[in-house]
Image (tube, coloured by chain):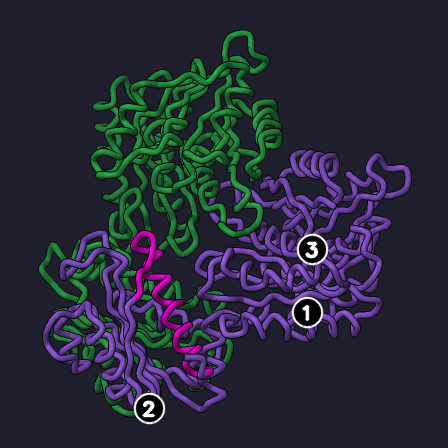
Chain colours: A green, B purple
């Protein structure tokens, strides 16, 4: 089963928006074991969208087209799919009712344009997940069509809406079409702190066992500063059974690599840390030098972070470390400084837990230490600790890796893993 | 003149890397007045890269192919281009010498694999800009070829190398092929604080004048939280003359919209602020609530920020604003609080200039104020001021717009524009 992605929108070609949707869909397809050989970006132009869809159907078994489902005259994906299928657009009363209800619940009047969104190509079905006013579509090529048996999925360009539909309908439907008549369930365990080859080695025996015996399958996906994802997939006769297989396999995998798993599915490292702090009734303060505010900004990206996050001190200048955080005067790219920052910031801000990070982001060396030299500090209760780390890459990556690395240390400490 | 972009790399299809290169190239093409109707991502597969290039040549006059120029066996872009051109790969002694010299100057031994990078399709020329070991290529289709007269440009996937080559060679060469025999120069003025239609209105008379008289041309490009870019382009017989026309036009445009221009070409808002502070010998401290560290993290993205940036306080909890920054107790989503934060943080951190920002990022209201309600504070010398702003969008955009909006206010104040 091969599936291409076509992203629609002139703003994507002009570079006004970076097309992160295709990347995300590509990752989901890879994790689901579906090949994807091409991704195309095309503008809001009828002929060019049609030619992209026709070519994708030529080369592949399925196409996910993303964007162009809004209510304006520019949004022509629906129309073009109908043209490619060789069918009419029909008005869908049930979708109109849903759109009306959505506007009603927000106390807004629906414009006539929005009725365009209730148009569905004949023979297509709408995707049950519908978080916005744009319905997603499953459009099988009709009997007698040159590409009969192939399918176009249309999802909105709004990332949250697209994700819900791709995860909830598109991927399961693709897996079903790939010949899997049973129900498929999957779960992604997000890990930090091991290389892909290290993970493969740890899970080697389990993967061999799964090759021999029926059950789940395991796949890896390296995701840069988001760590490495381990995807578990299981087929069974019913959803409940598939979930049971996944749950059992998750238990096995966690018994082997459990302490490096920081989140499940879409859960980020900062979500994990905020949740753990909230569960344990602890508050957090951070003292940042090399990261310059990045840790605070990631934590406050989590809605509800205010329950646990008191704030931080960005102590970029050395003497701010001394005067505001009470760090003893002396060299500042040291373990001692990281510890004193962590301990100082929790006292100054009245938090239960303090984090500190100092280091060299480059391009220049500092205190004779090369870029990538970083020290973490962590203060909880009576324990005030530090550790040296080496971060790879340029200024941006050193700062990003330092952020997630330190949050991961806190996560492990809160779980009593270290 | 139509030009497509083909990005090569299996990691792009798998979503391990987001393809920001194509977006950047698309923007450069748009700014240079070159149409681009399709962008394609394809994996490291010989047949599929070849079919993507052939199709792009079919539909367009030129192709920029990005990636696959490295030294490993996976890097096959050179080979595929030679195949599409129907020519042999030749060894380029001059490129080999440059690669050897590059390794020598870094004190590293060159592996035999790197010699692959000195292979050039017959009839192609190398791009003079060569910041890494991968040479870029200009590959005109040879006489008798079905697409004679069309051209493939190959540039590396490393963003910094790609950008230097696209800006230095690819775009000027495309403009030359577009029929412009004279030299072309261009400059981008980056603006903040006006809508695209507002800018068009302000520059309406000047654009009309340029339509009637020879000189530069003006184009706009909306770039989200990076503001709106105004691109000036001029043709002349020599580079010096073109630069002169650009400089004269820049002066005219700045006399009309000058105070909303924050940077030129790749200069970001944080670069502008750091430069202005350095010129004026001022140091900065920031007090962040709603942005949670984002302002500090952007400023410290600028290499050399340590000369002017002392640090900040992320005062997320209300009582941290009171205890650490000396904000008077009371409601915290107010102009008074923003002022007190700005004034407090420069005192606590010993800086000349203080910034403060407080507001509601959502999803929930706070102090009965809806998400998007934000107050800026700014303290320089005797002046301690505040202003209310309304930010659009979700949590992420409210925080991003607040960051650049406040930095822009500081920029304007440092320039005595307000």
Q: Which residue is mark 3?
A: B113
Tell which residue pokes out farthest to the right in this image: B143
The magenta stretch spans residue B392: yes
**Residue bounds of the magenta highlight:** B389-415
Q: Chain of mark 1?
A: B
Q: Chain of mark 2?
A: B
**Can the viewer see residue A339 in this picture?**
no
Secondary structure under the numbered disc 1 in the rendered image: helix
In 3D space, how far apart are the residues under numbered discs 1 and 3 (Cα atoms)?
A: 13 Å
In 3D space, how far apart are the residues under numbered discs 2 and 3 (Cα atoms)?
A: 60 Å
Residue at 44% of width from left, 71% of height from top?
B301
Residue toward you, A337 or B254: B254
Residues marked 2 and 3, same chain = yes
Residue A90: name its quadrant.
Answer: top left
Looking at the rendered image, the quarter that the C terminus of chain A falls into is: bottom left
Sequence-earlier tag: 2 or 3: 3
Numbered label attached to residue B103: 1
The answer to whether A170 appears left or right of B331 in the picture is right
Q: Specify few, some or many for label 2: CA neighbours under 10 Å numbering under 14, 14-19, or 20 or more.
A: few
Sequence-earlier tag: 1 or 3: 1
Residue toward you, A401 or A213: A401
Mark nearest the camera among 1 and 2 is 2
Residue toward you, A386 or B258: B258
Q: Percent position (x, y) of residue A337?
A: 28, 82
Residue at 31% of width from left, 69% of height from top?
B293
């Amino acid at each position: 089963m091969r599936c291409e992605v076509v992203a629609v929108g002139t703003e994507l070609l002009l570079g006004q928006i970076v097309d992160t949707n295709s990347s995300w869909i590509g990752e989901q397809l890879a994790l689901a074991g579906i090949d994807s050989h091409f991704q195309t970006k095309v503008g809001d132009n009828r002929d060019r969208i049609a030619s992209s869809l026709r070519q994708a159907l030529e080369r592949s078994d399925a196409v996910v087209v993303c964007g162009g489902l809004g209510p304006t005259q520019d949004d022509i994906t629906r129309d073009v799919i109908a043209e490619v299928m060789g069918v009419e657009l029909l008005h869908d009363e049930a979708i109109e009712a849903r759109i009306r209800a959505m506007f009603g619940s927000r106390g807004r009047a629906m414009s006539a344009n929005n009725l365009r969104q209730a148009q569905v190509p004949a023979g297509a079905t709408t995707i049950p997940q519908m978080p916005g006013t744009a319905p997603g579509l499953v459009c099988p090529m009709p009997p007698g069509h040159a590409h009969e048996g192939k399918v176009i999925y249309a999802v909105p360009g709004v990332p949250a809406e697209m994700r819900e539909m791709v995860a909830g309908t598109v991927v399961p439907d693709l897996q079903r079409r790939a010949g899997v008549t049973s129900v498929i369930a999957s779960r992604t365990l997000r890990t930090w702190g091991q290389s892909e080859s290290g993970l493969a080695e740890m899970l080697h025996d389990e993967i061999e066992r799964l090759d021999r015996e029926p059950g789940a399958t395991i796949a890896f996906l390296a995701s840069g500063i988001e760590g490495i994802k381990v995807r578990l997939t299981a087929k069974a006769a019913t959803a409940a059974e598939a979930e049971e297989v996944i749950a059992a396999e998750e238990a096995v995998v966690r018994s082997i690599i459990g302490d490096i798993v920081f989140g499940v599915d879409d859960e980020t490292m900062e979500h994990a840390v905020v949740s753990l702090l909230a569960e344990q009734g602890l508050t957090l303060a951070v003292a940042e030098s090399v990261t310059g505010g990045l840790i605070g900004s990631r934590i406050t990206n989590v809605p509800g972070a205010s329950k646990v996050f008191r704030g931080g001190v960005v102590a970029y200048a050395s003497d701010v470390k001394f005067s505001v955080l009470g760090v003893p005067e002396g060299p500042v790219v040291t373990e001692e400084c990281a510890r004193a920052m962590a301990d100082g910031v929790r006292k100054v801000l009245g938090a239960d837990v303090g984090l500190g990070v100092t280091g060299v982001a480059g391009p220049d060396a500092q205190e004779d230490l090369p870029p990538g030299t970083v020290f973490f500090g962590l203060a909880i209760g009576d324990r005030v600790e530090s550790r040296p780390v080496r971060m790879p890459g340029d200024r941006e990556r050193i700062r990003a890796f330092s952020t997630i690395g330190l949050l991961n240390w806190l996560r492990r400490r809160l779980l009593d893993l270290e």
